[in-house]
Image (cartoon, grey):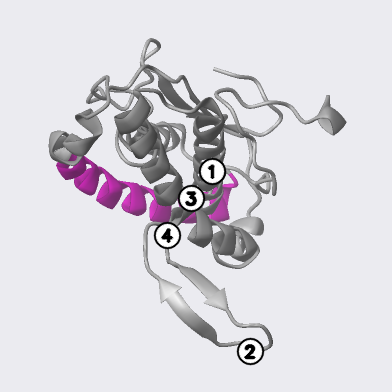
Amino acid sequence: MSTTTYPVHVDARLDSPSRWLWLVKWILAVPHYVVLAFLWIAFVAVSIYAFFAILFTGAYPPRLFAFNVGVLRWTWRVMYYTYNGLGTDRYPPFTLRDVADYPAHFDVQQPARLSRGLVLVKWWLLAVPHYLVVGILAGGGVWAFSGQTSSPRWALPGGGLIAVLVLFAAVALAVTGRYPRALFDLILGCNRWVLRVVSYAALMTDEYPPFRLDVGENEQVPPEQR
């Protein structure tokens, strides 16, 4: 795991994914999708409870915090295995805990105290600029505008920039058997941005996510913060 100034850590190591396994990962991952559906129902319920806990006590209950970190960790491993990364062919483990030798890792440093005032506005108001970016990265569609009009000429629905980049990676794997390193670094940076925003919106940190695309396997401390 890397050490950075931002409390949400998203790391991954590029394995040597096969040329064709990505074609069937959507089937192989079905058991994970089923479990995650229930885990995310619990994640939402825990987040609602945590909202009131923070509002009245200024603290996120540690066990609930650990659970929600685990749900995001599990989600990230499945995302990385499937169509948000395709960075490994190693099947994700069924656990909320960190698995040291698995190539994808996620963690959040739990703050000792959280702002009782920020909890009222950060998840819907303060995060709006990031939601716009996440909409581009993770889904919603891509719009093309004509020169001087404010109406879109056409819209291309899809999974967002990450899905497009992963599609390029899949084609590269099929044709060359190799995952382009620069493409991998960019895909990981986009996923890192999304997961930071999800963690912030889920009330797990008061630190505003940076408007910064930290590419590469390990997060880097920006020069101005060293």
The residue singled out by tag 4 in the image is 139
Residue 221 vertical position relative to residue 160 in the rendered view, above or below: above
Q: Which element type, helix, strand or loop, lies under badge 2?
A: loop
Residue placed most toward the observer, 215 or 55: 215
Type of amino acid at the residue the image marks with label 2 = Thr
Type of amino acid at the residue the image marks with label 1 = Cys
Q: CA distance from mark 2 to mark 4?
A: 24 Å
The label on residue 149 is: 2
Local packing at callout 1 (Cα closer than 10 Å; few below 14, some 14-19, many 20+) is many
The magenta span reads 32-58
Tell me whether circle 4 and circle 3 mark residues in contact (CB < 8 Å): no
Q: CA distance from mark 2 to mark 3?
A: 37 Å
Residue 187 vertical position relative to residue 118 in the rendered view, above or below: above
Q: Is residue 204 visible?
A: no
- Residue sticking out furthest to the right: 224
Local packing at callout 2 (Cα closer than 10 Å; few below 14, some 14-19, many 20+) is few
Q: Position of residue 176 (x, y in %)?
A: 36, 26
The residue singled out by tag 3 in the image is 202
Local packing at callout 3 (Cα closer than 10 Å; few below 14, some 14-19, many 20+) is many
Where residue 87 sits, quadrant-wise, is: top left
Tell me whether circle 2 and circle 3 mark residues in contact (CB < 8 Å): no
Q: CA distance from mark 1 to mark 4?
A: 12 Å
Q: CA distance from mark 2 to mark 1?
A: 29 Å
Q: Which tag, 2 or 3, sits closer to the chain's start?
A: 2
Q: Which tag, 2 or 4, sits closer to the chain's start?
A: 4
Q: Which tag, 3 or 1, sits closer to the chain's start?
A: 1
Where residue 175 sits, quadrant-wise, is: top left
The residue singled out by tag 1 in the image is 190
